[in-house]
Amino acid sequence: MTTARRFLLILLINALAILVPAGLFMQRVWTDIETAQTEAQGVTPARALLAATKLLQQHRGLSAVLLGGKEDAAAARSAKAGEVERALAAYGAALRSAGGARPN
């Protein structure tokens, strides 16, 4: 075996030793990028759900006040019910735009 062939063989072995781990690393990086993109798609529906939950809790508090005998809370409760309906509709739209299932 000539010296040139020996160097070529060493070069091929080293290239293989570098390319296999680099390929595996790049595969992992692409998987991580896809996961991050999928997670990012869920941020908008999650924010809409949190906003709807906040409004639902406020409506619940106003309902408790109304049931406690404070009749002047009825208008505020009714207005809050409209806000809750709009927030739930916005959540449904955000979920559909992100490719998720339709909420019940």
Image (cartoon, rainbow, N blue to C red):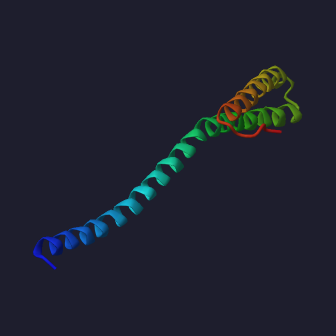
**Horizontal side of residue 66 vs 20, given as left or right:** right
What x and y, as percent, mark residue 11? 21, 68
The residue depicted at 34 percent of the width and 61 percent of the height is: 22
**Horizontal side of residue 37 vs 75, given as left or right:** left
The residue depicted at 58 percent of the width and 39 percent of the height is: 41
Residue closest to the eye, 83 or 104? 104
Name the image quarter holding residue 92. Answer: top right
**Horizontal side of residue 38 vs 8, given as left or right:** right
Q: Vertically, is 7 above or below 74?
A: below
What x and y, as percent, mark residue 82? 79, 22
What x and y, as percent, mark residue 89? 75, 27
Name the image quarter holding residue 101. Answer: top right
The residue depicted at 81 percent of the width and 34 percent of the height is: 65
Q: Vertically, is 13 above or below 88?
A: below
The residue depicted at 65 percent of the width and 39 percent of the height is: 50
Q: Vertically, is 28 above or below 43?
A: below
Residue closest to the eye, 61 or 47? 47
Q: Quadrant of the N terminus?
A: bottom left
What x and y, as percent, mark residue 104? 83, 39
